[in-house]
Every structure is written in structure tokens, then in C-alpha cells.
Amino acid sequence: MVPALTACAVLAGARSLPAVGEWIADAPPQVLHAVGAPPDPLLPERLLPAESTAVGCCQTR
């Protein structure tokens, strides 16, 4: 799910890793549904990876 959301963020104009993380945190519900983000069983929203997870997955070591 993180690579798909990262690709969406870049296509939407995110140009840095922090910008990608911010975009994912604010992603539209339709995008989250399309990439298969699981719904939270207690809240009417989707579970998202943390911004640090998205940035960590994109950094080279």
C-alpha cells in the first residue's frame, strides 16, 4: 500500500519525502479505497501508514 500511495503523491505533485508523507496523511478517501487501505473498525476512516513509515520506505540506505 505504501508504494502505491507514494506513487499517487508524486503524481499529485509531491517533490520531497516530507511532502509525500504529508500527502498520504491528507489523501482523499477515494484514493485510500482504491489502493486498499483497510477501514478502521471503530472509526469511519481508513487506517494509514504513519508519515515516518512512508518516508522510511522511500529512503535509500
Image: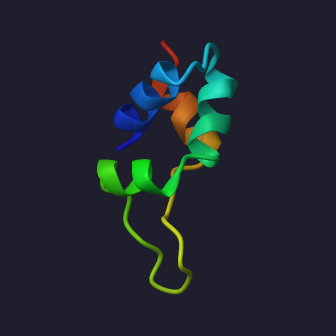
Q: Nearer the viewer, residue 17 or 59?
A: 17
Q: Nearer the viewer, residue 12 or 46?
A: 12
User: What x and y, as percent, mark residue 50?
Assistant: 59, 49
User: What x and y, as percent, mark residue 11?
Assistant: 46, 20
Considering only vertical position in the picture, is 19 above or below 54?
above
**Outermost residue to the bottom:** 42
Considering only vertical position in the picture, is 23 above or below 49?
above
- For the point 36% across and 57% down, the residue is 33
| Lateral position of residue 9 relative to residue 23, left or right | left
- For the point 67% across and 37% down, the residue is 22
- For the point 60% across and 20% down, the residue is 14
State how the image is colored: rainbow
| Lateral position of residue 17 relative to residue 3, left or right | right
Question: How many numbered tags mark residues here?
Answer: 0
User: What x and y, as percent, mark residue 2?
Assistant: 41, 39
- Residue 7 sits in which quadrant? top left
Considering only vertical position in the picture, is 31 above or below 33?
above
Q: Nearer the viewer, residue 17 or 53?
A: 17
> Which quarter of the rendered picture does the N terminus lie within?
top left
- For the point 32% across and 48% down, the residue is 35
